[in-house]
Amino acid sequence: MRYLIVSDIHANLAALQSVLNDAPSFDAIWCLGDLVGYGPSPNEVLERLQEFPLVSVMGNHDWGVLGRADPYIFNTDARHALLWTRGELTPENQRFLAGLPVGQKVEDFVLVHASVREPIWEYLLDANAARKSFTFNNFRVALSGHTHIPAVFEWDESTAEARMSPPDWEEPLQLGGRRLIINAGSVGQPRDGDPRAAYGLLDTEAQTFSFHRVAYAVEITQERMRACGMPARLIERLELGR
Ligand code: ZN
């Protein structure tokens, strides 16, 4: 089976649409949370995703939009977008969002937004943070998002340490018998200095994972954000990829 791996779409329909156009054929979408928040098209993104066979987990922004976390734990800009999104979602889409699991195991892959240890909130930004997940339980391959920065973490059994490496954009990653945490990056708000939408493709027969990037019309999303009164900083960061 071939899975399209997307995360942190953040209600950015133009970015999601570019990914769907760019991706070779796939059997289903696996979405790693933060479907909404920040962006201007929450209903459209949720409806587009549901046109495909879909497994999705819950992200911290989804959680916040549903009112399950105090909005004041989010920064001012994120909180503004979160409260706007809450007012915007149709009852059907609110129900869909509320039904998302916090984590999901499919075959021997674990899907989480943040980390295996703390699926909604923990940021895996370095090998040391990843180490805590590898020792938390015995998953084989975990797929996560949340940081908006594509990365691969590999467990080294002999040293009991995790290694972090940047994605190889040219060569598919061979999963082999290794224990891995793979972050495909963010579709709708990349933060690795590259504003293009990031996504992954997992081939469970070939046992490979490949990282991909595709440009999208950032200005369309920015224009929609202006029209719904989003904070300027959220609008500007999209073209910077920061
Ligand atoms: Zn996010």
Image: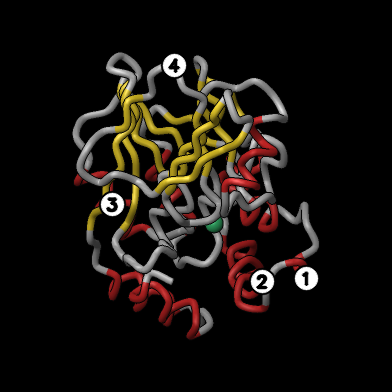
The residue that disc 4 covers is 177
**What residue would you read off at disc 3?**
17
Q: On the rendered structure, is 108 left or right of 137? A: left
Distance (Cα) linking label 4 and label 2: 42 Å
Determine the image quadrant of residue 204.
top left
Q: Quadrant of the C terminus?
A: bottom left
Task: Estimate the spatial distance between the alpha carbons at disc 1 and disc 2, rounded to whole Å.
Answer: 7 Å
* Image quarter for ligand 1: bottom right
- Crowd rating for badge 4 (residues with CA inside 10 Å; few <14, some 14–19, many 20+): few
Residue drawn where x is 61% and y is 48% of the image: 59
Disc nearer the start of the sequence (1/2): 1
Placement of 152 over or under 204, stated as above or below: below
- Quick one: label 2 or label 3, which is nearer the N terminus? 3
Residue receiving disc 1? 72
Label 3 residue SS: helix
Expressed as whole percent of the image width and height from the top left, the position of residue 65 reads: 66, 57
Badge 1 amino acid: Tyr
SS type, badge 1: helix
Position of 106 with respect to 19 (left or right) is right
The structure residue drawn at horizontal position 76% and vertical position 66%, both measured from the top left corner, is: 73
3D distance between C-alphas at marks 1 and 3: 32 Å
